C-alpha cells in the first residue's frame, strides 16, 4: 500500500510541475508575440531598457520622466500624422536648404526650423509637414541618414502628438541619445528594442519541495543548457556593444581626419592665392618702374 501511495504522489507532483513549465512557456510565447522593436506607447521605464524589461529606473533622468506630467503643446499647428521630425542638422543649415532637399519627395505644406528665442541660432532640429501621406512615407523611408552640409541627419515621424505618454528629452524621456551621455533611450527608429533573451522557465521552488518532487537528471541538463545559452546571449550582446563603440570611434576619427584634410586644403589654397596676388603686384610694380 505504501509503495502505491509513493508512486501516486510522484505522478501527481510530476503533473503539477509539467503544468507549471507549460504555463511559463505559454506566457513566454505570448510575450514574444506581443513584443515589437518600436514602442507603441511611451513608457520611460521601458525606454530606458535595451529590451524593455527593466522593473526599476537605473538613472535619475528616468525617475524624473516617470514623475513628469507632460502635455503636448496645444499651440503647435498642422496635422501630426503628416509631419516628420528632422534632427542632427548642421547649425548652418537653413530653411531654404531643407525645403530644396525634402521637396523632392512631395509637396510641402509647412516647414519649421526650431531656433533659439534669444540668439536666433538653429537648435539643429525641425519639423516638415507634407500635403499627403504618400510623400510623408517616401521621405521617411529615403531621407533618413542623408548627409546635409556634412552632417548625417535623422528623420522620424513626429511623436509628441502621436505617441501616447510621450515625455521629451529635457524631462528625462525622449528616444535615442548618445552613449557618451549615459542616458540612452530605446524603442524608436534610431535605437529599437532588442528581443529579450528567453530565460529558463523553471523556478527554484521546484527543487525544494522534497525528494519526490525533484526533477530528473535530464531536466537538470536542459536547465543547465538553457543557462549556458543565456550566458552566450549576454556575451554576444556585450561583444556587439563593444563593436558598436569601436565603429563609432572609427567614424569620429574619420570625420576628424576629413575635417583636418579640408582645413589643410583650404590653407594651401589660401597661400597659393596670396602668392599669386603678391606675384601679380610685383609684376605690376616692375611694369610701372620701366615706364
Image (spheres, rainbow, N blue to C red):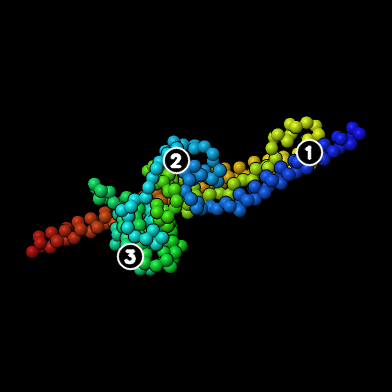
Which residue is under mark 3?
109
**Is 202 on the left-hand or right-hand side of 138?**
right
Q: CA distance from mark 1 to mark 2?
A: 43 Å
3 or 1: tag closer to the N-terminus: 1
Residue in the foreground of this view, choosing between 157 and 244: 157
Q: Answer whether residue 85 is visible to the viewer in this image.
A: yes
Q: Secondary structure at mark 3?
A: strand
Q: Position of residue 221 (x, y in %)?
A: 76, 40
Which residue is under mark 2?
66
Instruction: Identify the image quadrant of the N terminus.
Output: top right
Circle 2 Cα neighbour tier, 10 Å, few/some/many (<14 / 14–19 / ≥20): some
Snapshot quadrant of residue 219: top right
Q: Is residue 252 above or below residue 129?
A: above
Q: Answer whether residue 143 is visible to the viewer in this image.
A: no
Q: Position of residue 222 (x, y in %)?
A: 74, 43
Which residue is under mark 1?
13
Q: CA distance from mark 3 to mark 1?
A: 68 Å
Amino acid at each position: 500500500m505504501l509503495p502505491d501511495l509513493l508512486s501516486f504522489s510522484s505522478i501527481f507532483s510530476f503533473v503539477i510541475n509539467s503544468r507549471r513549465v507549460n504555463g511559463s512557456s505559454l506566457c513566454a510565447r505570448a510575450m514574444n508575440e506581443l513584443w515589437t522593436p518600436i514602442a507603441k506607447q511611451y513608457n520611460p521605464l521601458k525606454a530606458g531598457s535595451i529590451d524593455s524589461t527593466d522593473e526599476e529606473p537605473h538613472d535619475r533622468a528616468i525617475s524624473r520622466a516617470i514623475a513628469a506630467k507632460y502635455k503636448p503643446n496645444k499651440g503647435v499647428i498642422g496635422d501630426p500624422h503628416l509631419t516628420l521630425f528632422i534632427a542632427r542638422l548642421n547649425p548652418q543649415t537653413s530653411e531654404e536648404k531643407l525645403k530644396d532637399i525634402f521637396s523632392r519627395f512631395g509637396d510641402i505644406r509647412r516647414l519649421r526650423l526650431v531656433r533659439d528665442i534669444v540668439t536666433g541660432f538653429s537648435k539643429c532640429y525641425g519639423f516638415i509637414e507634407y500635403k499627403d501621406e504618400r510623400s510623408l512615407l517616401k521621405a521617411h523611408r529615403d531621407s533618413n541618414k542623408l548627409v546635409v552640409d556634412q552632417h548625417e541627419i535623422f528623420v522620424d515621424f513626429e511623436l509628441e502628438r502621436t505617441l501616447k505618454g510621450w515625455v521629451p528629452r529635457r524631462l528625462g524621456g525622449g528616444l535615442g541619445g548618445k552613449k557618451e551621455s549615459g542616458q540612452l533611450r530605446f524603442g524608436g527608429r534610431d535605437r529599437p528594442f532588442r528581443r529579450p533573451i528567453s530565460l529558463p522557465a523553471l523556478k527554484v521552488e521546484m527543487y525544494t519541495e522534497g525528494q519526490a518532487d525533484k526533477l530528473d537528471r535530464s531536466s537538470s541538463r536542459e536547465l543547465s543548457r538553457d543557462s549556458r545559452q543565456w550566458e552566450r546571449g549576454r556575451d554576444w550582446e556585450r561583444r556587439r556593444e563593444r563593436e558598436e563603440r569601436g565603429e563609432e570611434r572609427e567614424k569620429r576619427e574619420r570625420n576628424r581626419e576629413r575635417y583636418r584634410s579640408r582645413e589643410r586644403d583650404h590653407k594651401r589654397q589660401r597661400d597659393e592665392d596670396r602668392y599669386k596676388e603678391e606675384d601679380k603686384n610685383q609684376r605690376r610694380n616692375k611694369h610701372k618702374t620701366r615706364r
